[in-house]
Amino acid sequence: MVSPEVVSGSPFAVLGLESTTGVPPLVTEAAVYQVAGGVVRAGPLVWPVAVDAPMVEIPHRSRPNMRFAPPWSRVTGYLLAVLDRRVLVMHDECRLAVLRRHLPDWEPDRVLFTRGLAQRVWPGLDSYDVEPLARAVGISPLPGVNAGAAVEAYAVVMLLSVLARRAVGQASRRRRCGVIRDEVPLDPVRAGRPRIARDARGAG
């Protein structure tokens, strides 16, 4: 888990992936939101990816893009550029493992997982997968997008916001109760629902 000291002053790159159902999974779409100071500065930045896999393993929503999508080798440069010098935020270690298989020579400096934070804040839920978790905590779907990497990235952005508010609230209660040391998993400066910058969707 990224400590408040590490996160403080660092912008986030929230990454969502869509992948094939085969083993190992191949990325068919990547989407990124860039967040800084509680504001979505850019996104969703979405890259469809052409894969060499049976059509039956490719999600239905990704199939229309396969004909004209670039290969992963062409997407890599754009993706790494928007991740550079940012705290990488993904839902869980499994999603990071998929990314690492596609980028064997790359290692993020700092990573934050919303699943682990959610398990601490909301113990006992039926599922901590990103979509049911988002529904459980009242996060609405991304308008105009049915599913895919952009929806996953959006859900993670919103989860990050909700978790930050909860962390600040818990820290405040502990201070009122006389607890000296607070273990706040997110930077209080970034707490609150992210606002969408006016030019965010066109950035990048």
Image (cartoon, grey):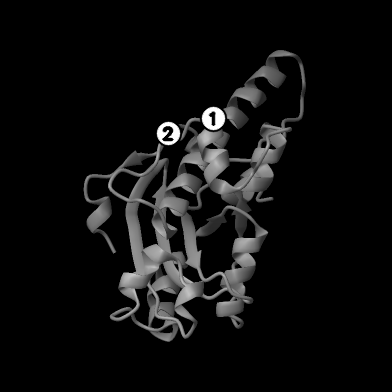
Residue 98 in the image: above or below residue 134:
below
| Residue in front for this viewpoint, 194 or 59 | 59
How far apart, in angstroms, are the residues tagged by discs 1 and 2? Answer: 8 Å
Instruction: Say which quadrant the C terminus sits in.
Output: bottom left
Q: Which residue is mark 2?
A: 193
Q: Residues within 10 Å of mark 2 (few under 14, many from 20)?
A: some
Q: Farthest residue to the front: give it.
A: 56
Q: Position of residue 185 (x, y in %)?
A: 65, 40
Q: How many marks?
A: 2
| Residue in front for this viewpoint, 112 or 171 | 112
Q: Which residue is mark 1?
A: 165
Left or right of 191, for residue 77:
left
Who's the residue at 59% across and 68% down the image?
108
Amino acid identity at mark 2: Arg
Left or right of 199, for residue 139:
right
Is residue 188 visible in the rendered image? The answer is no
